[in-house]
Image: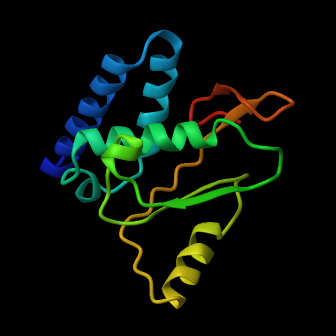
Amino acid sequence: MASRTDTLKQEKIEAVVALVRDRLDGTKATTAERFVRQFYVNVAPQDLVQEEAEDLFGAAIAMWGFGRERDAQTPKIRAYNPSFEEVGWQSAHTVLEIVNDDMPFLVDSVTSALNQQDLTVHLVIHPIMRVTRTPKGTVKDLLDSDAD
């Protein structure tokens, strides 16, 4: 039996998926829904349930857009302070996004480096997305999380 917080997490994800279906069309919506579900699947329930569905939608879609194009074996990194007026979602904290090939200990190393700079890490979302890309680095397909 699922705990109350697990149920609340699932309800929150479904609210985000409803926004995806409402705001995106066709294959974009289908792929974005799969991305949202994979993006948030391993996030602790208590880290999601207090957030607004609108902001979770914005964070996931921003990340999906940012990571859709990337040169092979070249990490892509950005840090920004999202505001609703500028990017359609908001956070009280600076957001650091990293898209790269799967690499052991990357999350621990980045977290440690931030802590050494006396910066507090409020939330880590670390999905390992399996994608196929075109030769130019554009995502061709988002695969299921258990795919090779």
Above or below, 94 against 5 in this view is: below
Q: Is residue 31 left or right of residue 103?
A: left
Q: Residue furthest top?
A: 26
Q: Position of residue 64 (x, y in %)?
A: 54, 38
Q: Position of residue 109 (x, y in %)?
A: 62, 76
Q: Is residue 121 left or right of residue 104?
A: left
Q: Residue furthest right?
A: 135
Above or below, 60 against 99 in this view is: above
Q: What residue is shown at x 59% (from left), y 36% (from top)?
A: 146
Q: Position of residue 94 (x, y in %)?
A: 42, 65
Q: Position of residue 32 (x, y in %)?
A: 47, 27
Q: What residue is shown at x 24% (from left), y 44% (from top)?
A: 9
The image quadrant where one finds the N terminus is: top left
The image quadrant where one finds the C terminus is: top right
- Residue 1 visible here: no
Q: What residue is shown at x 43% (from left), y 41% (from top)?
A: 60
